[in-house]
Image: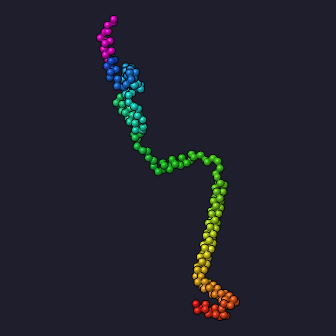
């Protein structure tokens, strides 16, 4: 059997202590990889090494804009503590403003560099469309006038019918009286012709009744 020296015993104790400290991640391979990265890390340089344990037992949560900004701020703060040069993301300069003359000059320069329009102008198409819509409005006006005239004719006929009905109902008693007198005269003539009454007797009886 081989005996271990005091240095070897101290290294094994430290490695076992490190494994026990990093056992919260839930993966021994991840712990061993982090220990290896820590052993080769050099102070003062950021190489993107993984020197912190991650808890792999937790479920992964969906990220978003707020989470990305929070992670960026934390990374900038860590770089600031290390003394590294960091690139801020806006807010370091005020809004640039131009005078009226400078604005006019920039607008004129921008309009001058607009390329000419390629292709046809489309004036004939616009002229045809204008003529087509003019004809359509005329046709719609004509149809509207026809519907108005048809409505007037229908209302006129309906009014005539209502007038005729009113006149018929107003003259109905007179018509009924004349019809009854005619029937009485016919009945008197029939009675005289068949010997049931003397001439003039039927009319008197009918007048008396």
Tell me: residue 54, above or below residue 185.
above
* Quadrant housing residue 159: bottom right
On-image quarter of the N terminus: top left
In the image, 172 versus 14, the foreground residue is 172
> Residue at coordinates 65% horizontally, 61% vertically from top-left?
135
Tell me: residue 191, above or below residue 116.
below
Q: Position of residue 194 (x, y in %)?
A: 69, 89
In the figure, is residue 167 to the left or right of 37? right
In the image, 11 versus 206, the foreground residue is 206
> Residue at coordinates 57% horizontally, 45% vertically from top-left?
113
* Quadrant housing residue 183: bottom right
Q: Which residues are magenta?
A: 1-14
Q: Reply yes or no: does residue 8 show up in magenta.
A: yes
Q: Position of residue 161 (x, y in %)?
A: 61, 75
* Quadrant housing residue 21: top left
In the figure, is residue 110 to the left or right of 65? right
In the figure, is residue 10 to the left or right of 187? left
């Amino acid at each position: 059997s081989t005996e271990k020296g005091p240095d070897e015993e101290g290294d094994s104790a430290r490695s076992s202590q490190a494994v026990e400290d990093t056992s919260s991640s839930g993966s021994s391979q991840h712990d061993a990889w982090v220990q290896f990265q820590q052993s080769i890390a050099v102070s003062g340089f950021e190489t993107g090494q993984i020197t912190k344990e991650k808890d792999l037992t937790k479920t992964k949560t969906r990220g978003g804009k707020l989470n990305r900004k929070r992670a960026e701020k934390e990374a900038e703060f860590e770089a600031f503590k290390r003394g590294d040069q960091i690139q801020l993301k806006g807010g370091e300069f005020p809004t640039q403003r131009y005078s009226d003359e400078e604005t006019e000059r920039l607008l004129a320069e921008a309009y001058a560099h607009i390329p000419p329009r390629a292709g046809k102008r489309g004036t004939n198409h616009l002229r045809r469309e204008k003529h087509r819509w003019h004809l359509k409005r005329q046709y719609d006006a004509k149809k509207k006038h026809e519907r108005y005239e048809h409505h007037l004719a229908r209302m006129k006929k309906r009014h005539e019918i209502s007038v005729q009905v009113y006149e018929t109902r107003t003259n109905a008693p007179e018509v009924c009286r004349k019809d009854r007198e005619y029937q009485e005269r016919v009945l008197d003539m029939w009675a005289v012709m068949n010997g049931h009454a003397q001439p003039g007797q039927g009319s008197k009886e009918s007048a008396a009744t």
